[in-house]
Image: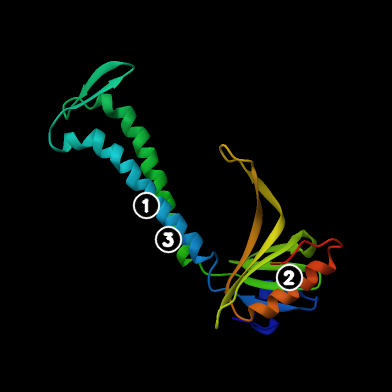
């Protein structure tokens, strides 16, 4: 929702003053829903994939049967009375299972994370969440903006000039810019317009805005 400077956290108010304010808003979520869903689904898929190996190695043990496999071209037999040959596979599979659980838990945590305060001033863009303020000068934005406008709440994605190269197999490397998400906020169009103006004012050769 939109906020005035009089009903925001005192710490944020101190950071803003004595600057004038273009906009103040608070997002409902910290990350877009699609990001949370992707992490949750990927975590579940990872767990499903690793479970195949888990049951391949340990399934027979649950039936009190032997597990036969080769290690360095040497036949190995493991059983409930001889679990030592399965120690290394258990560690490797356990690590992969923990990774899957970690991704799933992180996705669920993202889903319930509360949003941030966002403040625009003539000189900078401020994000404030859990007592921590992150300030970005307008010149650090590339000018590429994506909007998702809905009847009540919408979202804005502001791309930065910073980012990283993504190495892709059998394809050319792809540059992935850093993005600041303003998720589920009011007055999306007005806030986007003000952001675009400030970015242009601080960039003599602005990028295109989508």
What colour scheme does the image use?
A: rainbow
Q: Give 26 or 173, whichever is nearer the viewer.
A: 173
Q: Give 155 or 58, whichever is nearer the viewer.
A: 155
Calculate the distance from the C-alpha at mark 3 to the C-alpha at mark 1: 11 Å
The residue that mark 1 highlights is 44
Residue visible at 69% across and 77% down in the picture: 191
The residue that mark 3 highlights is 108
Identify the element where label 2 is drawn.
helix
Residue visible at 35% across and 38% down in the picture: 94
Calculate the distance from the C-alpha at mark 3 to the C-alpha at mark 2: 32 Å
> Where does the image place residue 18, in percent across and percent down from the top left?
80, 76
Mark 3, mark 2: which one is toward the viewer? 3
Question: Along the horizontal axis of the image, is 45 left or right of 175?
Answer: left
Residues marked 1 and 2 touching at CB (< 8 Å): no
Calculate the distance from the C-alpha at mark 1 to the C-alpha at mark 2: 42 Å
Mark 1, mark 2: which one is toward the viewer? 1
Identify the element where label 3 is drawn.
helix
Q: Is residue 71 above or below residue 129?
A: above
| Of pointers 3 and 1, the one earlier in the residue sequence | 1
The number of discs equals 3
> Where does the image place residue 145, in percent across and percent down from the top left?
68, 66
Identify the element where label 1 is drawn.
helix
Residues marked 3 and 1 touching at CB (< 8 Å): no
Q: Using the image, tell me which numbered label, if any, was put on residue 15.
A: 2
Q: Is residue 80 above or below residue 148?
A: above
């Amino acid at each position: 929702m939109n906020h005035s400077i009089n009903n925001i956290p005192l710490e944020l108010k101190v950071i803003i003053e004595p600057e004038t304010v273009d906009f103040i808003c608070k997002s409902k979520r910290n990350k877009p829903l699609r990001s949370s869903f992707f992490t949750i689904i990927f975590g579940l898929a990872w767990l499903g994939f690793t479970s195949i190996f888990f049951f391949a190695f340990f399934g027979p043990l649950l039936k009190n049967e032997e597990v036969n496999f080769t290690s360095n071209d040497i036949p190995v037999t493991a059983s409930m009375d001889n679990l030592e040959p399965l120690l290394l596979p258990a560690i490797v599979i356990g690590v992969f299972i923990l990774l899957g659980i970690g991704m799933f838990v992180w996705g669920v945590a993202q889903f319930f994370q509360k949003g941030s305060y966002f403040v625009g001033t003539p000189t900078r863009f401020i994000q404030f969440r859990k007592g921590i303020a992150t300030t970005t000068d307008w010149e650090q934005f590339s000018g590429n903006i994506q909007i998702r406008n809905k009847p009540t709440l919408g979202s804005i994605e502001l791309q930065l000039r910073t980012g990283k190269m993504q190495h892709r197999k059998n394809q050319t490397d792809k540059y992935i810019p850093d993005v600041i998400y303003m998720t589920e906020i009011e007055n999306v169009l007005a806030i986007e317009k003000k952001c675009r103006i400030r970015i242009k004012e601080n960039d003599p050769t602005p990028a295109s805005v989508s």
